[in-house]
Image: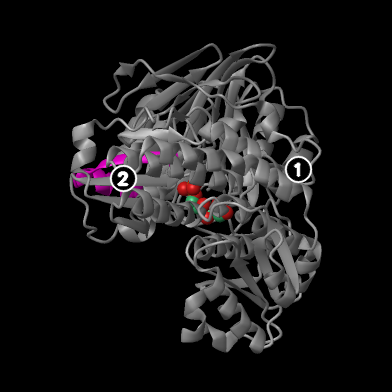
Amino acid sequence: MCGIVGFTGNVPADKILIDGLKKLEYRGYDSAGVALAYPGRLDVIRRTGKVAVLEEALSNDEHASCCGIGHTRWATHGRPSETNAHPHIDCHGNIAIVHNGIIENFVALRDELIAEGHTFRSQTDTEVVAHLLERYYEGDLVAAMRKATQQLQGAYGIAAVCVDAPDQIVVTRKDSPIVIGMSDGDVKGSFIGSDMIALLEYTRDAIFLDDGQIALLRPNSIEVFDRSGKTVEPTWTHVDWDAENAEHAGYPDFMLKEIYEQPRAVRDTIAGCVKNGEVILDELTLDDEDIAAIDSVYIIGCGTSYHAGLVARELIEGWARIPTTVDVASEFRYRNPIVTPSTLVIAISQSGETADTLAAVRLARSKGAKVFAVTNVVGSRITRESDGAFYVKANMEISVAATKSFLAQIACLSLIAMFLAQKKHRLTSNQVASLYSDLCETPSQIEAILENQNEIEEAAELISKAHSAMYVGRGIGATICKEGALKLKEISYLHAEAYAAGELKHGPIALLDENVPVVAVVTDSPTRMQTLSNVQEALARGSHIVAVATEGDTEVSEIADYVLYIPRTRDWCSAITASVPLQLLARHVALKRGCDVDHPRNLAKSVTVE
Ligand code: F6R
């Protein structure tokens, strides 16, 4: 949930650590700190609040150390405070560590360590790691890390420095990402990050550390060891992202920038995937026999990725006629889901690191199912634990509120649905070619929506003054509503509900009055008329209506207060296009309510804890 950076090299580390921490700010945090290593001494500087406050504190002194670790903390155990901020040190200030994740058995370990005479200063679960390293340290920090992590239960990415080897960093992980890289440009040295974005300015080639591996970083070398202490040859992965992608590029916030990047994200994701009516998905490494044996599909994901899964169910069932279940990963992992070797499991995760989705992947594989990941992050944990991975080409997504990755996921999932339908002989080549041609239209349709945003501001003004908003639609529209309502909640902190429009009269209609506006997705679909009737029911209760409708739909404009138009498109393609006005609407509402759209409170970009 938080960020780790580290550097050992040829220039002072403080500025590099601060730059890295700034790049990780988007992930959400409440305090930040660094530890700079010197022979016989560690300087640990921590502050609550923004990285800029830490930067200011560091600027008061010269820091010559060329080796250090840094952290942004998102409080789990112990309130946000300077004492609870990382790095944490052992009793004598000889070892400093930063940690992402949660140490589940920290209470027992802390009691044990206190009984041994260790003094604790913070309320965190993390501090036990510093004292465990102290317990096991006999001049070799790698060996101490191996012994210390054998005691830990839970999830962790840990980096440590020690006064005895002040140009070395030792790092390890379990269920929490750690990326390592090297640069031999002007800044020469070895880097770590909990996210590739922290390294991108220096390198695009990285080692994504595996669970249980320990790495020793020196200015000119990286050594990786397995659990038993044997040296292993690390796998280097090239990441095709631009450092510039992490810049605002003239946009007021990352969310808006990424909304505008959606046409490209969809185009890049689908490019070249259908040739002469044949869907080409080399990533789906299933032969004809495997595909013939598939009798069900299970889709798992969380939040926005789960919503992409709901869209995929409509497409897979509609085109391939394979029974498809969609579940939130946090529920799936604790049930006894009906998954067998003939179930195809699709795990959707933008980050590829979401703890619940990862656990769900492991469960599905333990039941003998083949699992394919749909993700945006090369080398991420979920991709490495799945049987195959489809990479959506959204490029790095920084805004906590997912936008471009969602549209790219839907585009990718629609190709998977076409592929399965074709292999199951439910769609002919001509039909696939026609579906693909509709899909290829969506990027320019998004561009048209972005060019013509009339009424969004006014609609946002209306919603920003409400105390709750009701989103309704049917079919694909119902899912788009779920995603639209989620966007509104997470960035504007305004309560919103999303309902299948036909469900309104079974309860939620009791909420409606002139203070609860209804956002209705009434695009061209087989159920447009039924949805319109539900809108009338809402009108009759005094609700103001904001509608998403197809250009030229005067019937809707007659009854709605504001209409956000999208170009005429196939119903299934509206999963992509109709999402865009709802993203923009949520952003405008958030801005009108004075919210920081890129840093929504209490949220983190990648949720690597349960
Ligand atoms: C909402 C949002 C979250 C994520 C969810 C899953 O805008 O971003 O709901 O979709 O935390 O994250 P991934 O897709 O990384 O598994």
Give the image location of residue 52, x and y in percent. Answer: 76, 43
Quadrant of residue 511 within the rendered picture: bottom right
The residue nearer to you, when weighing 450 against 394, is 450
Residue 328 in magenta stretch: no
- Left or right? Give the position of 296 relative to 103: left
What numbered label is drawn on residue 399?
Answer: none
Give the residue displayed 54% in from the left and 43% down from the top: 438
The image's colour scheme reads one colour
Q: Amino acid at mark 2?
A: Arg
Give the image location of residue 230, x and y in percent. Answer: 29, 19
The residue nearer to you, when weighing 157 against 95, is 157
- Left or right? Give the position of 534 relative to 335: right
What numbered label is drawn on residue 426?
Answer: 2
Q: Amino acid at mark 1?
A: Ala
Q: Could you tell which of marks 2 and 1 lies nearer the N-terminus? A: 1
Magenta region: which residues? 358-374
The residue nearer to you, when weighing 570 against 326, is 570
Find disc 1 in the rendering and name its residue. Answer: 52
